[in-house]
Amino acid sequence: MKKITIIGTGYVGLVSGAGLSDFGNNVCCSDINKEKIELLNKGVIPIYEPSLYELVNRNVKSKRLIFSDNVKDSIQSAEVIFIAVGTPEGKTGNADITTVLQVAELIGKNLNNYKVICTKSTVPVGTGKKIIDVINKYNQNNIEFDYCSNPEFLREGKAVSDFLHPDRVVLGVASKKAYDYMKVVYRTLYINKTPLIQTTIETAEMIKYAANAFLALKISYINEVANLCDEIGADINIVTEALGSDGRISPKFLNPGPGFGGSCFPKDTKALIRIAKKHNLDMYTVDAAIKANENQKIRMLNKLEKLLKGNFNKKKIGILGLAFKQETDDVRESSAIYMISGLIKRGANIKAYDPIANDSMKKLIPGIDYKLNWESAVEDCDAVVIMTEWNEFRGIDLSKLKELMCSPIILDTRNILNIIELKRLDFTFDNVGRK
Ligand code: UGA
């Protein structure tokens, strides 16, 4: 097993660090943010991610996982260093790799013996080469090192199980020595027959964008099929059941909704188009997926407008769900942002509730009425909109909901409510492709 340092303790760094220590490696999660490290050392996990607390705790107890704000020392003591810092969307749609290159500089300056430097952050194709150049520039004693591109495929809300039980591990390397090192890092998976895909650095970087853009395409496609179902009176649930049972299509990522959000698909689809543009190529399909996604958000607002017969003014609307998906407190690019902003512009009054993400949304949209349970969020409302597919909302007592509301109008953008019950209780309702 290897001595590993992970630089960056965001959700990717923390989950990867805890997961790699669970595989038997000795891991130091390192960050220049002293407050974060202090919290982690006190056993506090700064993000909401199911099972992460247990995974971290278990490995801290077994002394395979430590946290440090001394990035220099943690670089020098490691055999393998993972770069897991953020690559936010830059002004032009490119991923901003400034922090990644700063970390590369720090690694170059502190290189003291052979190490494999491995990138987990999502970076544009060609970044690996830039990282190697920066390390070389500051590597004054010409110490040998290798580079590896090891993209992550972790879904927020399911990141722990995605890390511990991945479909594949992609290792983009330029030398056998680097691959052999990484094989030891992932030995637990390797002996459990998880495919380790060895490839070049550029191919590994490409795989990450190709995977995310493909999934975004799949969602946009099914959203458009659902919209057509709306118009012709077909049922998207049966359509996806039939589509999904075709092994070539698979049932995963075929759930229509209010448009994909989060910190990855919106950013990575745009970044892929930018990468292609640099090579004088158009990616018409990815471009269409982005446009279809924008349209989906607009369509949800239009659906609500129709339900309210064109009048939002002074209407009380209850929003259930703010996170971009269930099991996370993340609201980045959440379709709920578009819905709430649109409603505010049209003069509606909003009450909102999310089991976990109220505080995250408060930072973005402070001026609405946040509630601590669904009941108070729907009370006296003229309409209710389900934006996130939390299990809590799947099990809502619809009779109680009707009693609490001023008029029984509901838009279910996640298709989680029982249509037969809604009809029986005389709700005026809409959803995505299930009329
Ligand atoms: C996504 C990928 O799924 C991960 O493999 C990848 O590692 C990650 O991006 C990343 O690049 O870091 P994530 O954004 O956390 O993960 O969440 P997803 O579960 O992929 O959901 C993204 C969006 O698509 C959400 O808004 C979700 O509600 C929506 N979605 C997903 C649908 O509308 N329908 C579906 O069937 C699936």
Image: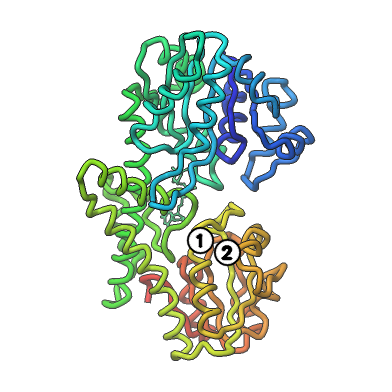
Where is residue 318 drawn, in percent x and y? 60, 77
- Residue carrying label 2: 322
Question: In the shown orientation, is residue 130 left or right of residue 184?
Answer: left
Location of residue 167 (image quadrant) = top left
The relative height of residue 231 versus residue 292 in the rendered view (above or below) is below
Q: Residues within 10 Å of mark 1 (few under 14, many from 20)?
A: many
Taking 288 as reference, is 59 above or below it?
above
Q: Which mark is residue 269?
A: none
Question: Badge 1 is on which residue?
Answer: 334
Amino acid under disc 2: Leu
The answer to whether residue 429 is above or below residue 135 is below
Q: Position of residue 354 (x, y in %)?
A: 63, 64
| Horizontal arrangement in the rendering, residue 185 relative to residue 285 (left or right) | right
Does the numbered disc 1 mark a residue whose Cβ is under 8 Å from ligand 1?
Answer: yes
Q: Which residue is drawn at 47% across and 65% down?
A: 414
Q: Can residue 67 be seen in this view?
A: no
x 60%, y 23%: residue: 5
Q: In this view, does 18 lie to the left or right of 427?
A: right
Does the residue at mark 1 contact the one at mark 2 (Cβ under 8 Å)? yes
- The residue under the point 35% across, 69% down is 295
Tell me which corner region of the image, top left, top right, bottom left or bottom right, holds residue 362.
bottom right
Q: Which amino acid does label 1 sit on?
A: Ser
Q: Closest to the observer: 346 or 198?
A: 346
Q: Distance between the residues labelled 1 and 2?
A: 7 Å
